Amino acid sequence: MSQSVNYNAVVTVLGKDRVGIIAGVTAVLAKLNINISDISQTILKDMFTMIMLVDTINSTYAFEKIREELKVLGEEMNLEIRIQHKDIFNAMQRI
């Protein structure tokens, strides 16, 4: 990952692999005017995992509204979808 990537939040997605996961998550982010700065996804056996570095600066939605929209999508798609501020995510990785 390049140091020049601009992002202020991290979105993580975890769940059973199936068609449409990336499309569903990115559609919600686009609707909220959130830019994806970097993305990594993998499938381990039948488990889908994805981490996205996102920039919420141009979104007119409050961070809690963004979190709620992703939570609703996660419930609809039977996925665990979380968004965290970059600093919180980084701090948790150091523990």
Image: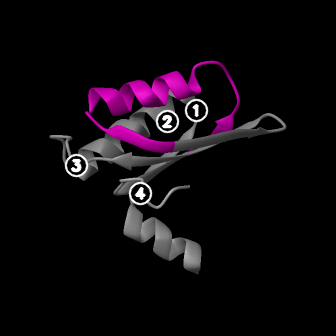
Does label 4 or label 3 sit earlier along the sequence? 4
Give the quarter of the figure containing the N terminus. bottom right
Span highlighted in magenta in the image: 13-38
Residue 48, horizontal then vertical, whole percent:
69, 37
**Which residue does the numbered mark 2 point to in the structure image?**
74
**Residue shown at the point (19%, 48%) measured from the top left:** 62
**Which residue does the numbered mark 1 point to in the structure image?**
78
Proximity of marks 1 and 4: CB atoms separated by less than 8 Å: no
Residue 92, horizontal then vertical, whole percent:
52, 73
Label 1 and label 4: CA atoms lie apart by 34 Å
39, 11: nearer the viewer: 39
Q: Identify the amino acid type marked 2.
A: Gly
Does label 1 or label 4 sit earlier along the sequence? 4
Direction top: furthest residue: 19
Q: Is residue 87 left or right of residue 46?
A: left
Q: Identify the amino acid type marked 4.
A: Ser
**Which residue does the numbered mark 4 point to in the structure image?**
4
Q: Is residue 60 above or below residue 19?
A: below
Label 4 and label 2: CA atoms lie apart by 30 Å
Q: Is residue 28 left or right of residue 32?
A: right
Q: Identify the amino acid type marked 1.
A: Asn
Q: Nearer the viewer, mark 4 or mark 3?
A: 4
SS for dot 1: loop
Q: Is residue 14 above or below residue 30?
A: below
SS for dot 4: loop
